Image (cartoon, rainbow, N blue to C red):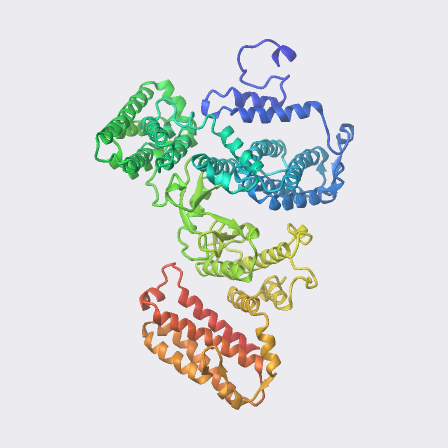
Amino acid sequence: LVKKRGPESEALPLSRPDFVEEAEWDLLTGMCAADPAKRFMLRDVVCCMEVLAREENDCSLTTEPSEIVDHTVEDVSVYEIQSLGQTLYATLVDTDRMCAELQEFSDVNRPVVDRLVNVYEQLRACVGPLPVALVESFSSIVMRFFEMLEQRCDQEGAFGNSSAVATLGAARTLSGKNYSIHNEIDGLLRSSTILDETPVVHRWRLRLKEAERRQRQTMETFQEDPSQAVNEVESEAQQAEALMYLQFEGRDRGNTAVKRGGLGRHLLRSLREAARADSGTTASAVCSRGLLRELADFEQESRLLVKLAETGRLVMYLTRAMDSALGILGLLDGPATAAWYQSLQQERDERVTFYEGVLADNEWLSREMGDERQQLEVLSLLKHDVDQYSEVLTSRERDVMSEVYDAVGGRSGVVTVTLPHWFATTERAWADAFKSPVAGEEECISEVGIWSMLHHPNVRKFYGACYAGEPFVIHEDCLSLSDVDITWRLLLDCALGLQYVHERKFVHVKLSLSNLLYSRSSKKGILSGMGLMRMVFDDGDGRYGADIDRNACALLDVLAFGCVVLELLMKKHGPERSREWSRVTELPVARPDFVNEREWSLLVGMCAADPNDRISMGDIVYQMGVLIRQENNPSEATEALRDGSQLTADDVTAYEIQTLGLTLQATLDEADEMCTDLHDLSDVTRPVLVRLVNVYEQLQTAESPLPVALVESFSETLRRFLDLLERKVDSDDFSGDSDNTDDGLYNPLVVDMNSFHLEIDRMLHS
């Protein structure tokens, strides 16, 4: 650039020269950063240069460049991408549809869709006209991503089902392409004063890194046992394709897993030799695969002090891996054990010597310390590693880690506090864990402060969190509820989770589809634990400065939950209806044809414009329970009405619950005996029984005839109450204390009894 545009210079100047554009300067400063940890990776450089190349060619997608100057877009919702012949909104809907169709690539495609949707929603929310250049740039990104997905869909249709390993290879290619799209979105956000880049959805790097890690793990699994990839496909062509991918991926496998000066070199080499000795057919190959994955992740970290802070965890892992490998190979009590441990100890000693050299070099240490954020990260991680793994560290390792801790703390002035019990640095301590980024340290601590208090089968499990460096929370790995077949059972699960959250005096306020999830392990619908806040309330003296009360907070969630339920029903009943997915903020005026009357009644109650008219979470839980029974036994009520629309009082006395073979009175007597047996739980079970007895007495004394639907409803409630009592009697793990405490733990019996009370209320009111 200097030779082409300006005076000669041998070093990057302190400020941007006039002949260098801002985007060019951002690239140059990223490439020439003094701190190696802050320097761009090559793929960042490539992405930035691609953007600059397109700008250089000045290729507008929808209009001529001369038309852009000083023009504005009044309504982005009707803005059309001319080369596609459809609006931005329609293009995003099609993009969302294709992303759903390409489900095997959702890990890498969905984050891009989410970011594009967020930018579009920000543009729609802007007051006043928008610069046409901004809208053009955004539409350019949308169209490129749209065309990429369209091409992938065409390939899937042309070639049919590919082998899993070929699909994985394609996913990794898409990941690389999406990296470029992500960088373009970043550039768009940074260049505009209108757009906000702080929403969590734009913290994409950790999500992409996690997706790539999973891809790498899966590929390593196939490489260790190629038969998995080959045997799953039938045609010889697909089998050859799978083997070709495996050979290509395996050319340099493991070459970068352990760099010079790292840990585990001898162990990895020994495992490879053992695998070669028996043609890789023993379990030693499994150990080797896990070791490669762990060491590869460790070596990807370029910051030396952060790597030092992982010493204890890595040594613990290597020790366990070594014991497992020695046991598998039958060498535990032989001379190999001492030799392997001696080699590991030698590697550890060499590593300590290296870090002692870093400590002795003030300039090197200062450079490795980084900025204040990295210093806090290093101090927190060092403290955590020593606290958790002190027993596996040698005295030299503890000393050098302590000296680094003191040196960084002394030079930076950063002070660390006692780490909370939930502090964690990796998700690998749990079998089904996933980590999600959060915006910053304060937000992380705030999120965890609430989430760690919640314990309920329909609230996503929280495992741990790290607020240092790039903060993240570790939680149960789940699917979005929109990615599974929606049933009222799953929606009820989420409703129970939200009801529990409200009972614990927390609310979502901004509840959306992203908060409703499906647990892979329990197969239940669950509520996300992220995005919660305490209910705002005033204690009467104005000390909380509240402008809304607790009930108002909860009713906001009820409205949002109703909108999400409608959104899911739209998705369930056809892609043509899912085009409304981003517009569900209120109910339509008339009942849609894909919603039955009972479902519509529930939605109307949840989404009432007047908060005072909205139904409670208890009512929602009850009505969803009715919908589940209707979903499971759609003809039951119809058959009952067909047998006779009315009953007399005498009929009620003789009425029999056929599944039990008992009359209503006999069933009540059975329930009374069980309540007596469950005397420790009588505080919660007896009131329900008393009310059921009273309703039965009213039915006996009522003027004949009685609606059969009323008697059927009463008998069904009574039957389920008896069934619950029977299960409680048969259980050996109940106690009055555990079921009546208010310690924040989920109390299923109390919730069940509340549900019965609501059903009885509903019967009486109707």
Whole-percent x, y for residue 344 in the image: 28, 28
Q: Foreground residue, 111 or 722?
A: 722
Whole-percent x, y for residue 217 in the image: 45, 37
Whole-percent x, y for residue 78 in the image: 74, 44
Quadrant occupied by the N terminus: top right
Q: Is residue 335 left or right of residue 38?
A: left
On screen, 168 above or below 686? above
Question: Which image quarter: residue 361?
Answer: top left
Q: Residue at x 55, y 36 (%)?
A: 166
- The answer to whether residue 512 is seen in the rendering is no
- The answer to whether residue 105 is seen in the rendering is yes
Whole-percent x, y for residue 715 in the image: 50, 79
Q: How many marks?
A: 0
On screen, 410 above or below 103? above
Q: Foreground residue, 470 or 172?
A: 172
Q: Is residue 434 left or right of residue 735?
A: right
Q: Residue at x 70, y 62 (%)?
A: 589
